[in-house]
Amino acid sequence: MVPVLLILSLALLLVWNKDSFSQEKEKQGSEGQILCVENGDQGKIEVNHQIKDCDGVYILMGNDGKTYTIIASDEDLKKYKLTEQDSYKVDGKIKGNQRAWIIDSTGSHDEESSGAETRNIEGDIFCLLPYYKTSKLKQSTLKPILSSYPCHELEPHSHVLRSKDGKIYSIFGSEEKITEIEKNPKDNVLLKGKVKANDSGLLLYVF
């Protein structure tokens, strides 16, 4: 009888540890500087450290050297906007690849969901090249560069599309698809994908 009870106890302990590990894995996130990437003047893109009145997408420049598009609820965004900080802790599930990372704290991001509308979006693609805080650079920032030349050999980075009507879409997709876009740049491009509107901006999942 004792061996049976011991086996059952060990089995329950393994199941509990597995569940705890899964929950811990789901509760991942990253820490860094939150930036607002929004439409500027004369077809340009602006990157602002002031995120209170952001009218674009929110990007986290993680201390881990990665840049993430933030998918967050309006409630979470209000928390970030209440104070200007050098570093924010953003919780959420990390998805994507080295050319298109996202942090989703809402659990709503699913490119295959019925809530994603398939559309053709025409506009200009911008590379968001990361520059991290150094002794000479006071704040980490992103430098938006119009993608008019191949950028696949540069350090992996995020991209946004500025549509003809001035909307900003954060580009998300497989590493193969993003690399294909990087190798064939155009000042004006037509991308087909699924569009998801979130409190934190627009996401374009390309395929």
Image (cartoon, rainbow, N blue to C red):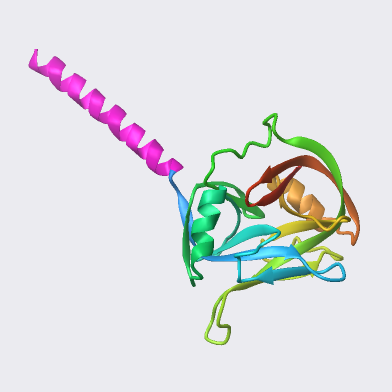
The quadrant of the rendering that contains the N terminus is: top left
Q: Is residue 207 visible?
A: no
Is residue 179 left or right of 198 when viewed as pictured? right
Q: Position of residue 74 (x, y in %)?
A: 57, 50
At 70% across and 58% down in the image, what residue appears?
A: 56
Q: Position of residue 173 (x, y in %)?
A: 70, 45
The quadrant of the rendering that contains the C terminus is: top right
Q: Is residue 44 visible?
A: yes
Q: Position of residue 152 (x, y in %)?
A: 75, 60
Is residue 102 left or right of 174 when viewed as pictured? left
At 90% across and 62% down in the image, what residue appears?
A: 187
Magenta highlight: main SS: helix
Q: Position of residue 32 (x, y in %)?
A: 50, 65
Is residue 18 left or right of 72 when viewed as pictured? left
Q: Is residue 105 above or below residue 129?
A: above
Q: Is residue 193 above or below residue 185?
A: above
In front here: 156 or 54? 54
List the single residue furthest toward the top: 1
Label tally = 0
Is residue 14 left or right of 46 when viewed as pictured? left
At 87% across and 55% down in the image, what residue appears?
A: 165
At 52% across and 46% down in the image, what residue appears?
A: 105
Q: Quadrant of residue 133?
A: bottom right
Q: Is residue 42 magenta?
A: no
List the single residue furthest toward the left: 2
Q: Quadrant of residue 108?
A: top right
Span shown in magenta = 1-26
Q: Quadrant of residue 205?
A: top right
Q: Is residue 2 magenta?
A: yes
